[in-house]
Image: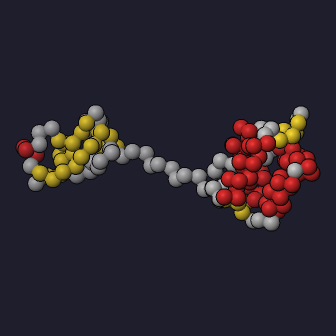
Amino acid sequence: MARLAQIVDGKVTNVIVGKAADFPDHVQTDRGNIGDTYDGTDFIPPAPVPPPPNPRMSVGDFLDRLELNEQIALKKASRTDDTVDTMLENLKMRDTINLESVTAITMRDYLLSIAPVGTGQTVLTAARITEIFTP
């Protein structure tokens, strides 16, 4: 019995154990795995999938995502908008923020609902809000 790889369009689609004579369209191998690319000689594994970005970060790292003019826009907005003021106070009390938490999603959605935040050079746009809150 031999280890046999089925190749379809240059990719290993199946690996079985059987008699090579019974499966003439398979390649005998001791290395190929499902998902590998086969170039006629070598089996090449697919590139590893990078892990998803970590949604947790320090509040400092989160605030570093904001440009100075965007920080100013939020500070100015907090003077007249109790919700924005509460958001900034909430951040001051934390060491970390999870961008997938209910709190962060609520912050993002509120800021999007009032975007653009600020005027002139001190403005935080909807596109930037989305970018800032993406892990």
Q: Is residue 17 left or right of residue 86?
A: left
Q: Position of residue 127 (x, y in %)?
A: 71, 37
Q: Is residue 102 left or right of residue 124?
A: left
One can see residue 68 in this view: no
Q: How many numbered discs?
A: 0
Q: How is the image coloured?
A: secondary structure
Which residue is at 12% across, 51% downward? 18
Q: Eyeballing the image, is 2 above or below 91?
A: above
Which residue is at 70% across, 58% downward? 103
Q: Is residue 27 left or right of residue 70?
A: left
Q: Eyeballing the image, is 109 above or below 126?
A: below
Between 80 and 31, which is closer to the camera in this rendering?
A: 80
Between 90 and 7, which is closer to the camera in this rendering?
A: 90
Residue 85 placement: quadrant: bottom right
Q: Position of residue 99 (x, y in %)?
A: 66, 55
One can see residue 76 in this view: yes
Which residue is at 87% across, 40% downward? 118
Residue 59 placement: quadrant: bottom right
Q: Position of residue 43 (x, y in %)?
A: 30, 43
Q: Is residue 90 left or right of residue 102?
A: right
